[in-house]
Amino acid sequence: MKMAWVTLPQSQNLNLRTILLCLFPCSLFLYLIYSYATSSSVFTFTPQPLLDLDYSRHTTFEFCASNYTNYCPCHDPRRQKRFPKVRMFRKERHCPQSPPERLRCLIPRPVGYKTPFPWPQSKDSAWFTNVPFPKLVNYKKSQNWVRLEGDRFLFPGGGTSFPDGVNGYVHALSRLLPLPHIRTALDVGCGVASFGAALMDYGILTMSIAPSDEHEGQVQFALERGLPAMLGVLSIHRLPFPSRSFDMAHCSRCLVPWTDNDGLYLREMDRILRPGGYWVLSGPPINWRVNYNAWGREAKELEKEQSMLEELAMELCWEKVAESDQFAVWQKSLNHMGCIHKLKTWGRHPKFCNSSSDPDPDAGWYTEMSACIFAIPEEKDTHRPRVNFDEDNRRWRRRVSRYGEMLKSLCCGRYRNVMDMNAEFGGFAATMAEMKYPVWVMNVVPVDAKGNINNNSLPIIFERGLIGTYMDWCEAFSTYPRTYDLIHACGIFSMYKDKCDISDILIEMHRIVRPKGALIIRDDRDVIMRVKETTDEMRWNGTLVSSGDSDEKDMILLVDNA
């Protein structure tokens, strides 16, 4: 059927346009009246957000598909395949930057998830339903890493270098090292972190790192046990720690090619070790004369490998203090002056970093490794700030006491591990330790998108005998879902309000806090009110609480991740 077009005279066209223009406002008015009668939302007043929070994209946050249960945004195997394998670069952080890659949904928990065992029982046991990966049990069966008995995993303390148990391994190490004087350690290629667990009995706090792996989450097992661990790899970029951080670094058959690329990775160990700190190596090539057959390696190859290692350690001004059974132990020099003179008499000229061209030794966020040695500064030459902790300690004692009133179970082992998203100088963690709360704290010092640190307090945190890492909260943390029992976020949303979508930070917090865990979000009142809008949309049970301190204007949002 054809449409019949009627052509009006010009004057009639004009009259028609006039009529339509007159009728349009009336029609619009009638439409709005109708809409108001049927839906009260049309005239709902929406105030201008005080923060750059885009709430218009959704009214609630839905859960992701079940195959995202163990999703690590910056360590996604699907994204990793886009990057080269050379020097393990594929295993570094590669984060989604924008939709549709960046998820706007909440990570679901596994079917049958159970509350983890309380500390210290969780150090030795974990529910199978929480980390349902039996592959590691079979793959490492002869090394006694982990056993599956009924509905739970047991961690008997075995390892590649200590199949008979880590306690005997650490006891043997204690005969070579003054373990009571060591406060912090880095375990490279940590497995399920049994070494770090054993060091806790000596009062040593160990940061255990390993890359994402084909054995379905060694680091995830470590975190499920409640032990300090994070995803990390020696590749192109430095580890996310400042220089002179750890008292000890350890590698037990960690498969790191220490002497490759001009000794780049051993130089990275030198950067993060404190003066006088120890580097411990067990496994190939140490004691190769006895073990080369068991390792299935050629004796000459291992001899050459150890010779290169000894040469490199000498260039780093490390002194070999022990080699016994399966261990070799080197100690970093307290200063370089005497060592440099000795090396020059032998015709050796160690390559020191250039302060004007090489990156700051404390830079550790997407900073490429340096194939040089950072000189140990004299006390008067260090640029690290001197901090008077008296007022800071008083402030955190008041705050932590208030937290203890809000979370009655804080003292009783329910919360084993805590993340402090904006640690400042570590006052929160230090006070938790002082008050004998049975937790360890991951102290995070935020950086901006360009890696700049406005107040680099992480070196101070390590000097206090605590552990932590750099982090840009516009990205995801290098951990698995459901790995922290309690998250403390003080001022983090004010800090990032102009840098990225704050709801993305809350989605990440939801990813890493455990079911039945808790969040303490502390910030300016206006900021807290806006944050609560989003936590309500995430179906979190949030309660607004006064700071309880007349000297502070902060408000607290206490969230129960039921």
Image (cartoon, rainbow, N blue to C red):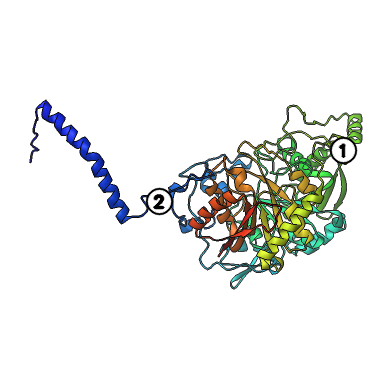
Q: Position of residue 371 (x, y in %)?
A: 73, 34
Q: In this figure, which residue is indicated by the disc labeled 1? A: 379
Crowd class of label 1 (few under 14; some 14 to 19; many from 20; radius 10 Å): few
Is 110 on the left-hand or right-hand side of 282?
A: left
Is 104 on the left-hand or right-hand side of 161?
A: left
Q: Residue at x 58, y 45 (%)?
A: 475
Quadrant hosting residue 455: top right
The front one of 200 and 98 is 98
Q: Position of residue 357 (x, y in %)?
A: 73, 27
In which quadrant will I find the N terminus? Answer: top left
Of callouts 2 and 1, which one flags the residue occurring earlier in the amino acid sequence? 2
In which quadrant will I find the C terminus? Answer: bottom right
Quadrant hosting residue 307: top right
Residue 527 to residue 348: above or below: below
Q: Position of residue 414 (x, y in %)?
A: 66, 67
The front one of 392 and 373 is 392
